[in-house]
Amino acid sequence: MRIKGQNKARVMVVALAVTAPIALAGAAAPALATSAQTATSCGQSVASLDAVAYADRLVRGWGRGDLAATACYGNAATAGALSAQATPGGIHWRRVSAEGAAGTIYVTYHDDARGGNLLVGVQNVGLRAADGWHAAYTARFSGEPRAWSPVQWSDNLVRAWGRGDTKWTSYYATPAVTKALAGISAVGGSSWRRIASEGAAGTTYVAYRNDANGHQLVVGVSNVGLTQGDAHAAYRIQYR
């Protein structure tokens, strides 16, 4: 496998992914479902949640393709807008801000894998009324794509493994790759330097050299998996 050289990039690993860009959809504040209806379809009350945690649950439910949860946290317009954008929404949505205006808390998320932003509006009155369901009454997609490339994704994986962060290692890589890296070392160390990258047949291969011991590591990242918002896009490694 020939791998062409590439300049080293500095990548910041973010702390929350919840993780599909650009379309607009929204609705006026909803007429709330009755308590009896929501109790039957959605379960126990969520009126005790704050609006930000409520929006997080909506985005995570949509992200994993849970249509029932999406329909419970959002009203019909919101659930329809999210499902029309992507089903499932993907796991890479990261909350970046929250602010209140005129009885609504607006929570913004960025999709780190594919780029684009999502703004969710949660009606405070709706959240406190009845059982708290269907309080997310608007969802709007916007923003210029600023997605992680496969090379950045691989860098994130190697850095997570390097510092012994099993949570994020398993986020970026498949279980098989996570296990293989742990078999090499529980803590990969900070001496890995990216030396080359090359794309081939839907996969980007990124090569690293360990300046401390001379070993090399090649990470294969699925381009399709990354663009579709899947987790564990790093699906193979070679170590020598």
Image (tube, helix red, strand yellow):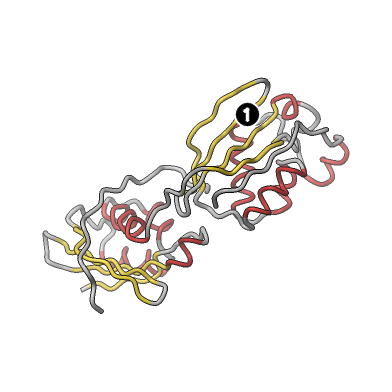
Quarter occupied by residue 24: top right
Which part of the image, by quadrant, shows the N terminus?
Answer: bottom left
Which element is circle 1 on? loop
Observer-nearest residue: 121 or 188?
121
Q: Residues within 10 Å of mark 1 (few under 14, many from 20)?
A: some
Which residue does the numbered mark 1 point to in the structure image?
Answer: 50
Front residue (pair 76, 69) = 76
Relative image position of residue 121 (x, y in whole percent): 65, 33
Residue sticking out furthest to the bottom? 1
- Decide: is 159 above or below 202: above
Query: Going by the image, does 99 lie left or right of 161?
Result: right
The quadrant in which the C terminus is found is bottom left
Number of on-image labels: 1
Residue 77 image offset from top left, x and y in percent = 75, 43
- Where residue 174 sits, quadrant-wise, is bottom left
Please report the residue visible at 69 percent of the width from the left and 25 percent of the height from the top.
124
The residue positioned 24% from the left and 58% from the top of the image is 188
Q: Residue furthest top?
A: 102
Q: Is residue 58 above or below residue 197?
A: above
Q: Classify 213 as above or below 46.
A: below
Q: Give the percent coordinates (x, y) of residue 99.
A: 55, 26
The answer to whether residue 67 is left or right of residue 172 is right
**Image coords of residue 106 (percent x, y):** 60, 30
Amino acid type at mark 1: Asp
- Residue drawn at x 35%, y 75% is 200
